Amino acid sequence: MNAPEPAVTRPMPHVMNTYGRLPMALSHGRGCWVWDTEGKRYLDALAGIAVNTLGHAHPKLVPALQDQAAKLIHCCNYYQIPLQEQLAAKLCELSGLSAAFFCNSGLEANEGALKIARKYGHDKGIDRPEIIVYEKAFHGRSIATLSATGNPKVQKGFEPLVEGFVRVPLNDLAALEQVAATNPNVVAVFLETIQGEGGINPARTEYLQGLRRLCDQHGWLLMLDEVQCGIGRTGKWFAHQWAGVMPDVMPLAKGLGSGVTVGAIVVGPKALNVLGPGNHGTTFGGNPLAMRAGVETLRIMEEDGLLANAAAVGDVLTGALREGLAAHIASGEVKDIRGAGLMIGMELDRPCGVLLGRAAEAGLMISVTADSVIRLVPPLIMTADEARQVAAILVPLVRDFLAHG
C-alpha cells in the first residue's frame, strides 16, 4: 500500500495509557456497520472482540434495555432477583448443567472458576491443590488469571505469579497422562475450548473426549473457558458441544449480554455445592439490567436462528478467504485459516499487526492476535453478503502485505 500508515494516537490526557489506540472514535452503529465521529463507515468484523452478538442498535434488544432501565438497573444480591433466576434457568437448559453464578466479566468468571477448583481440592483434603493449564492460553489479567494464562508478555512485570498451576501443551493427551501419573495434587483441568487471544486454536474433538475421560478417572473438575467461543459463536451454543462432552465448570461472558457487561459461571453436579454463602460474591454481578440483556440476547438468538446463521455465514467467509488467498495458502505465506462458525483465525507466516490500521483505513474492523493471526469475530447477525464484503476488503490487504510488507 502506498498510503501512509495510520498513526497510533497519543494517550488521552486523563485516561491511563494502557491501550495502543488507532486514531478513530466510533459514534454509532446499525447492524454490522459502525460510523466514526468523522462520518466514515466501517464493516464490523470484530464485534467489540466477540461481544456484540446482535450487532449494533438491534431493534429487539434496544427497547428491552430501555424498558428495563426505566424499571430497575441495579439491585444488590441481598435480595432475590427474578431475572437472575430466569437467565440461570435458560443457561442450564442450553448447557445441561445445574446452576449459575453471575458476575461482570470473563476475568471474574475465570477467577471464580479457579476458586471453585481450589475449594474443591481443599474439600477433598488436598492442602495445595494444583490446576492444569495450557500453553498459549489467555484467561484474564488479574494476578490469578494472568498466572493461569500462557503468555509471558502478559505476565511480565507482575511477578511473583500465583502458584498452583501445571502447564501443558494443547491437544497432547500423553502430557496430561504424565501429569496424572506424577502429581497427586491436581484437582482440575482449565482450558479454552478454542483459544482466542492465543491465535484461534481449537481443542480437537478427540482431545476433549479424552480429557473428559481422564477427569472422570482421576476425580478432576473439567473447566472449559467459553468466554470468547461460547454463546453461539461457533454454530452451537457452546463450542464443547461439537465434541459431545459436558464440563463441570463453564465460565461465560463477552457475547452473553450483546455489549452489556455480564459474566457467568455455570456448573454441573460435581461443582454444584463447592461454594456456599460467604465463599464468593459480587456487588454488580447479576444486576437486573445485565440479566435482562442476557435473557433478551438468548431469546433473540433463538427467534432469529443465529446459531445456524453463524455456522452458514462462517462457511461463506472462510470459503471466500480460502478462494481469494489460494496462491498464498499454497506458498505457505498463509499458514492456516481455522476456527468454527464466526470465530475465525487466519495465520500468516510473519507478524501482521500493521493490518489492524490498514483494515480500518479500508473501512473494516478486525484484530490481530498472537502477533501473526488475523482474528474475525463479527456479530452473529452478519449476512452472507456482508461476509463476502469482509473478504473483498481483507483479501487485497493481505495480498499487498505479503507482497510488500
Image (spheres, grey):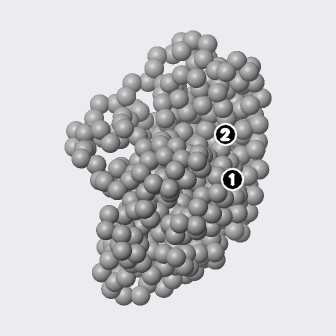
Horizontal and vertical percent position of residue 328: 69, 20
Residue at (42% x, 44% y) in the render:
150
Q: Seen from this angle, which residue lies furthest front?
A: 181
Label 2 amino acid?
Arg
Residue at (53% x, 66% y) in the render:
218
Number of on-image labels: 2
Q: Seen from this angle, which residue lies furthest left?
A: 14
Label 1 amino acid?
Thr
Structural crowding at the residue carrying mark 1, measured as other residues with C-alpha within 10 Å and reported as few (<14), some (14–19) or many (≥20): some
Mark nearer the viewer, 2 or 1: 1
Closest to the observer, 304 or 241: 241
Residue that label 1 marks = 205
Q: CA distance from mark 2 to mark 1?
A: 14 Å
The secondary structure type at the circle numbered 2 is strand
- Which quarter of the rendering shows the C terminus? top right
Horizontal and vertical percent position of residue 165: 38, 53
The secondary structure type at the circle numbered 1 is helix
Q: Is residue 391 above or below residue 145?
A: above
Residue that label 2 marks = 338
